[in-house]
Image (cartoon, helix red, strand yellow):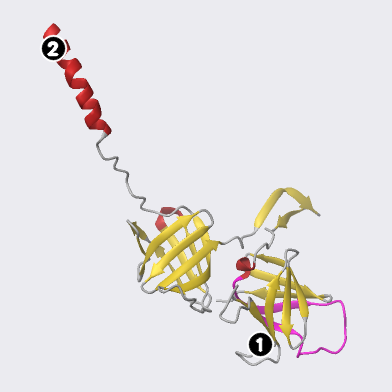
Amino acid sequence: MRKSALLLLLILPVMVLSCKWLPNKKKSPTSVPISHWVEVKRLNNDSTIRPFKDTIRVEFQRKNNYVWTKANGIQYKKTYTLVGKELAFGPFSLILVSRKPGKLILREDSIIHYFITDTSKVIKDTTKYKNGHVVETYLPVGSINQMVGHWSIYKRTSPQQGEVDYNKLIKMVDITAGSSDKKLGYIYATLDPPGSPSWAIDTYTSDQILQCSGKDKRNLRVLKCANQELVLEEDGITYYFKAFK
């Protein structure tokens, strides 16, 4: 009995050390947490900026479901697989380069896609009511990146009546958040032909103003960007835009 106890005392430290140096094998994740992303930048492999207009939005949903949408109307809805760093979306695959809070980087062949959290989702505060209806509040539009996309007018309101200046009236807003000419986007008047906007967006201020230059100077106040709707206001005219697919 004493020999067995002594032998155990001699073997035990060796067993502990052996366990200590065994590799700690952690299972690689097979899914991405539920989240919503919007593309804000594209680069080539040599880190040069790659201009784009087909802004990508991707939603990772429950049970590996996803919705992949481009601003040009192309949409994929199915299930994805994540094996190591390879993220397979059915008809195409990308490499998951990095995923951090608020930032996602994906690589597709020679293109690198940069995403940030897509906060353009309506938030309902069910504790506040007005005239018997739930008040809907929206996240502050604190960054130009929240508005990236191609926005087409579907309604406008104005308390003023009179002659309409179609050279001034807005029909479309194209927000890129940064392009080769260092502009944040472009504003099209009703009479502007495709590819010839009358104004460029120079800056987006902390008080939610799009400062534009071009045919003349103009400042557009951003009232809302949520639930696939963008609302701008200028000189009493309120413009309502949709990101049509």
Q: Position of residue 23 (x, y in %)?
A: 26, 40
- The boundaries of the magenta stretch are 148-172
Residue picked out by circle 2? 4
Relative to 236, say whether 20 is above or below.
above
Q: Secondary structure at mark 1?
A: loop
Residue 151 is marked as none
Q: Is residue 154 magenta?
A: yes
Q: Is residue 80 magenta?
A: no
| Position of the N terminus by quadrant | top left
Residue sitting at x 13%, y 12%: 4
Q: Is residue 128 visible?
A: yes
The amino acid beneath tag 1 is Pro
| Position of the C terminus by quadrant | bottom right
Q: Quadrant of residue 62?
A: bottom left
Residue sitting at x 45%, y 72%: 47
Q: Position of residue 214 (x, y in %)?
A: 72, 86
**Neighbour class for label 2 at 10 Å: few (<14), some, many (≥20)?**
few
The span from disc 2 to disc 1 (Cα, nearest Å) is 89 Å
Q: Position of residue 108 (x, y in %)?
A: 38, 71
Residue 197 is marked as 1
